[in-house]
Amino acid sequence: MRVTQSMLTRNLLSSLNSAKESLNTLNNNIASGKRLDRASDDPGQFIAASRFKLAIGRNAQYLRNITNGTMWTDATSDRLNDLYNKLSEVKDRAIQGSDDGVDSDTRAAMAEEVDGLLQEMISIANSRQMDSYIFGGTGTQTEPFQYDGTSVVYTGNDGAITRKIDDNTSVTVNINGQQLMETQMFDSIIALKDALNADDPAAVTDTIDLLTEASDRVMSLVTSVGSLASQLDLTNQRIETANVNLASYLSQSEDVDMAEVITKYNAQQVAYQAALQTMSDVIQTNLMDFLK
């Protein structure tokens, strides 16, 4: 088979284009720091890198959910502790009012103090986290507690606000108002106020146990929220550690060895320059033959 000048020229052009494409690919690798741009670059590693990225993205959403859940638990814990402290103040008034040496006027004044503390507790129970009522259940946009001077009414619901914190775990991050009502703290305080207004030391004494039981129930809620906060913190740490490992695996899958790729780039550039020179020589030779 006879090798013609046109065949030689086509082969040289093909080699030149191939060298240029390789040079461009290496240049892109250096600029991006990545050796994977498309699945065809390395199908196996490309699939692995895609899975690592998906896992990192999913974990990022879990971390956002945990952050949001932690905001809820922190706010809930703070308000429950506020309620517990106010309840302790009310109990102190009950102990004072149960003393037989206290006169009716003093008990009436105590009743006003207790009513003021109850109103403060209603205000705490109507606290918001951002724009959402903390204890309203899933009815976060409507004030959940009302006090008309004689009774406390809860108008929220017992809905659970949940957050998914890993592939297999969803947690309830709120305490709803129905749970607060079930502590009987509001009813116990109203019973104390009525007993003080009635100047009935025996009835006042009876409320001490009721207030103690209510305090224990509130503290139980505080403890449950604390346990949830610990779970969220541990899960957050575990996912952050997992993301560090995933990022390392991802880097191994798609990042270039910069020293290696620069060496290849320099070698390819030399090859490209040589191909250009060869092509130039061939064109000059053909031109001289033509002029002859």
Image (cartoon, rainbow, N blue to C red):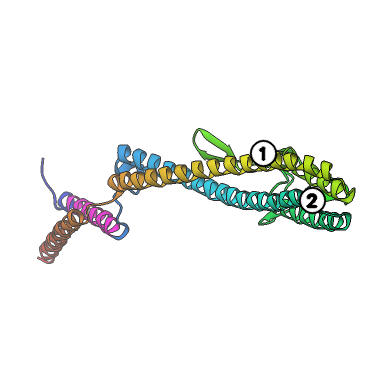
Front label number (2 vs 1): 2
Using the image as rendered, state which of residue 141 and residue 55 is in the foreground: 141
Is 29 magenta? The answer is yes
What residue range appears in magenta?
A: 10-30
Is 170 magenta? The answer is no
- SS for dot 2: helix
Using the image as rendered, state which of residue 14 and residue 125 is in the foreground: 125
One can see residue 155 in this view = no
Q: In the image, is 266 to the left or to the right of 172?
A: left
Residue 9 is marked as none
Cα separation, mark 2 vs mark 1, equals 39 Å
Give the x, y percent position of residue 171.
Answer: 57, 38
* Quarter of the figure with the N terminus: top left
Q: In the image, is 66 to the left or to the right of 276?
A: right
Position above or below: 285 against 236? below
User: Residue at label 1?
Assistant: 160
Q: In the image, is 223 to the left or to the right of 30?
A: right
User: Residue at label 2?
Assistant: 97
Taking the spot 28% from the left edge, 55% from the top edge, the residue there is 29
Secondary structure mostly seen in magenta is helix
CA neighbours of label 1 inside 10 A, class few (<14), some (14 to 19), many (20+): some
The answer to which image quadrant residue 186 occupies is top right
Taking the spot 66% from the left edge, 49% from the top edge, the residue there is 84
Please identify the residue farthest to the right as the structure is shown.
Answer: 198
Q: Amino acid at mark 1?
A: Ala
Give the x, y percent position of residue 228.
Answer: 54, 41
